[in-house]
Image: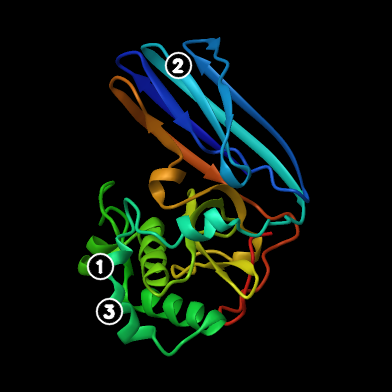
Amino acid sequence: MGADLGFTALEPCEIELQIAVARTPGLQVEDTLTLIHEGTALTPRQVHTPHGGLLHLIDVPPGRMQLTYTATVRGEAEVAGPSPADLSLYRRPSRYVESDTFGGFAFSEFGSAHDGDLLTAVSSWVGTRLAYVPGSSGPTDGATETLLKGAGVCRDYAHLVVALLRALGVPARLTAVYAPGCVPMDFHAVAEAWVRGGWHVVDASALAPRSSLVRIATGRDAADTAFLTNNGGNLMLDWASVTAVADQGLPADDLDQLVRIG
């Protein structure tokens, strides 16, 4: 898997990238990150983030830069259970997940469902009520806007799923992933919910098999997991290409079964 990104910086800026595969016990990751600015290599600073994530900080002078990331991943991830702080954090409202406004609505729709049945019910409900329409949502849209519009992309599907689950008291979080088989191919976003002693994937978009997903970043919502954040001057993303391939083919995905990112 990997990504190829091109930028033009009109002013000096610092960018944060979250595109590297998360360092999860049980996985063997071989990866490289190359940054070329106007013919000169740049060296990023690495910052470790929760749940094995890896953030790269880069000071970018004015000019053009190309980034190339490649990774080969083998093994099966061992995802740690939540701490008490995690359970608290992932039940709370957050920037794009206004779960405190969904309480009555969520209970009227899903109040009789529990655990795995609840995840299936929420996934099916969101998947049938939203239309996947690229460009239909903006970078500041949260779960409420998504519900009202009835359309969005993968991050919007995930935000709405997380909002409904948190409104029901279920710890839920958003995870950015590489997704072999995803159409259209891009960085992908899914929800994870803590039920039956594990973090299980909820992907209402059903764009890729859940058992082939590879974790990049995990957090409250897209504010924590965005692949690119610009903290400085004017920066343009000129192109982006993402690749994710499963060497042994894609598994079948029974949406009625609980699945973990592995």
Task: Establish if 48 lies above or below 94.
Answer: above
Does residue 183 appear anywhere in the picture?
no
Q: Amino acid at mark 1?
A: Thr
The label shown at residue 59 is: 2
What secondary structure is found at the residue carrying circle 2? strand
State the mark number for residue 105.
Answer: 3
Left or right of 244, for residue 27 = right
Q: Tag 2 or tag 1, which sits nearer the N-term?
A: 2
Residue 207 image position (x, y, % from top left): 49, 65
Number of dots carrying numbers: 3
Camera-side mark, 2 or 3 = 3
Report crowding for label 1: few under 14, some 14 to 19, many 20 or more residues within 10 A (C-alpha). Answer: some
**Residue 2: % across, % down:** 60, 40
Quarter of the image where one finds residue 8? top left
Q: Residue at x 60, y 56 (%)?
A: 83
Instruction: Label 1, secondary structure: give it.
Output: helix
Mark pair 2, 3: CA separation: 45 Å
Estimate the x, y position of residue 46 in percent, counting from the top left: 59, 26
Instruction: Give the distance between the C-alpha atoms of the residues marked 1 and 3, in whole angstroms.
Output: 8 Å
Q: Amino acid at mark 2?
A: Asp
Q: Earlier in the sequence, mark 2 or mark 3?
A: 2
Disc 1: which residue: 101
Can you say whether 177 is above or below 119 in the image? above
Label 2: how many residues lie within 10 Å, few (<14), some (14-19) or many (20+)?
A: some
Question: Percent position (x, y) of residue 156?
Answer: 35, 59
| Residue located at (55% from left, 64% from top) | 208
